[in-house]
Image (cartoon, rainbow, N blue to C red):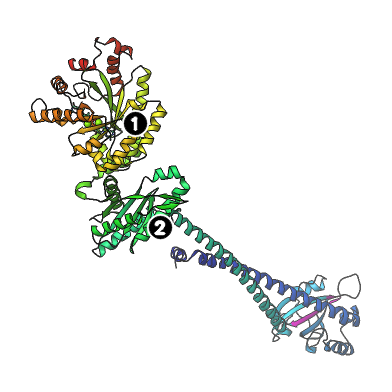
Amino acid sequence: MSPRLSAAGLGRLSLTRQVALLSLIPIIALGVILARVLHSQIDARVRADATETARLIATLGIEPRLDAADLTRGLAPAQIAALDRQLATRAVIGDLARIKIWNTADTVIYSEDHTLIGRRLQPSDDLEAALAGRPEEAKVVEGHANSETAGEVGLGKLVEVYVPLRFSAKGAPAGAFEVYLSYRPIAAAVMRDKRTIALLVAIGLALLWAIVFRIVARASRRLRRQSQENLRLARYDSLTQLPNRMMVLEHVARAMRRARANDGSIAVLVLDLDRFGEANNTLGSAIGDQILQEVAERLRGSLGDGTLLARLGADEYGVLCGRAQCAQDAQAMAVRAQDSLLEPITVAGTSVNVEVSIGMAVLEPDDTAEAILQRADTALARAAASARRIHLYDPARDSVDARQLILLGEVRGAIEREEFVLHYQPKIDLSSRRMTGVEALVRWAHPERGLLAPARFVPLIEQTALVGPLTLYVIEHALRQMVRWRRVGVNVQMAVNLSARNLLDRELPARIGGLLSAHGVSAEMLTVEVTESAAMADPSRAVAVLEAIRAMGVRVSVDDFGTGNASIEYLAALPAHELKIDRSFITGVLDDPRLEAIVRATVDLARNLDLTVVAEGIESAEVLEHVAALGCDEAQGYCISRPCDPDDLQRLLSEAFGVGAEKARSSRRGSRSIAATVVSG
Ligand code: C2E
Ligand code: MG
Ligand code: MG
């Protein structure tokens, strides 16, 4: 097995098994080293024992019976017999194989094998060392012919020990005593010892390994639990314990693959609680949290098998229906979800009515999880603006192309970087011909695409919740500009445009109030313009929001009047101060008697409803005079001034108000009428 293969094989094992296997290697190595050390220690002990035995025999059994002269001379038969007897007892050792007593002339003067007595043999180094008084350690040997061990051939393995024989305390040894012990019983004892020790070492190491394994296994279990918890936290919402957006995307992608394989379909619902922020602010976030949990509970109960409920954001939930057959299935599910929230939610003794808007999308060819969720989100914007609060994404009506989606993705950052800029278009009073105010019109100073007109991005943003932040941005910047102009003595009415979705936001009046007081601008100086059709999207809500705005003192204007299909009855119910006749009726008013009739009728209607009439889109002095003659109160249009940036406008304002920059003052032509200035210029 190549190292890479074995590493790959190891990689497939669990962490615990890997550690178990890898820890075996040092443990086995440790076992081998221990065995070696023990072996050499046992061996050393055997030699030391043998040496000690030989020394005892020499000192106790031999030296008292002989003297130096005996060794030089050789032994008498009686001495030999006495030694035979002495050594025959073998009380000291039972495995004595051979004994020799040497003199310094390398001659055997005694052996229990009498045939060796008197023989002079080739001395070994060991014998010479012993005769020189420096005996070496015991050695394991085997008998060899032509050596001093020739007499031991056939006795097997032996432990050989030399002991110098001394007969006086000082002086060189007079001879040497040599003992051969049979190695077989020693080897057997050594083996027994080794086996016992090896067993003990093995048991000890096995125990050690088991302990290490247990520690590792426990640590690995803890790690696994921790990583599972991390995974859970990354994929679940901690408040409701529902899957989060990331997990829902994975499930949608999987459900899509399954649906395609089985020729089925799936549906995705995005649910958004209406006015949840309001409840959260007034009741506190602890109660807000409980509401969100209860909503999650109810939605879970209302959805059948094969669905996955998730929390996508603050008060936004998502539902994946993996078994939807058609749009009707999704509709039915949306209705069930709405019904589950009909009953008010009671938290800490307070009953809260929760309403929900639901956007839906069903599987399309070449769909992706992100795309279907995005479509459901787009549908949600429409749902929020509709009376039923449920909308199924309709590719023919709701589609946005990829370029637009990219642009949409950039809006939040653009707001933060203040890429949106405001241009201002003046409005004049037709009787005095003096400027009465300006309308703030947003443009996007896009870093790559240049200055974008509102038609390029406002309708797109209006389909999403981003229109809320954008509107507040515009109001904030318009108020800042008013404060700047006020510093140079110019006080103008400011009009800002609201979108249909803004009128569903019951928090908008309070936010506008907050901005007005933050900038110290009085409410009467601000006008909000809403189109007829925006106000028609959800009439009762729109009227409630506009009434709250009007109650603060802010003026309300109905923009692009005539292009929507509001009934006169509804119009009368709108808390408006002003009607702006759409420019499509004004531009051609001189040439088309029908348009003239419409303008005349609108002026009549406005008079009866006590509303001011503004004519939009005045492109020539003739039209200006004509709409004045028809009874319009105010006018706005290119012939008075195109929308321009604040600096350019300040020049015009200085003309009109007779204040401001020196430059502007020096170019004044004496008239205080901006209309006269611009029209004649
Ligand atoms: P609007 O509120 O009706 O604004 C008037 C539009 O008519 C402006 O276009 C203005 O430049 C244009 N206009 C004014 N006088 C004439 C004229 O004599 N002839 C012609 N042909 N056009 C004239 P603009 O600035 O492109 O804005 C278009 C629309 O975008 C606005 O219509 C408004 O509905 C929307 N919009 C602009 N700013 C905002 C904003 O801040 N928020 C929202 N929600 N919508 C905005
Ligand atoms: Mg407008
Ligand atoms: Mg308009």
The segment highlighted magenta reads 164-181
Q: Is residue 28 above or below residue 342?
A: below
Residue located 26% across and 11% down the image? 668
Horizontal side of 646 relative to 517 (left or right) equals: left
Q: Closer to the N terminus: mark 2 or mark 1? A: 2
Quarter-of-image position of residue 599: top left
Which mark is drawn over residue 297?
2
Q: Which mark is residue 521?
A: none
The quadrant of the image that shows the C terminus is top left
- Nearest the eye: 644 or 560: 560
Count residues near mark 2 (Cα–Cα under 10 Å), then give few for <14, some for 14-19, many for 20+.
Answer: some
Q: Is residue 323 visible?
A: yes
* Labelled disc at residue 475: 1
Task: Tell me the quarter of the image containing the N terminus.
Answer: bottom left
Q: Is residue 463 left or right of residue 34?
A: left
Q: Position of residue 553 (x, y in %)?
A: 34, 29
Ligand 3: image quarter? top left
* Amino acid type for the residue under numbered disc 2: Glu
Query: Looking at the image, is mark 2 or mark 1 nearer the viewer?
Result: 2
Residue 304 coordinates in the image, percent (x, y): 33, 63
Give coordinates of residue 499: x percent, y percent: 28, 37
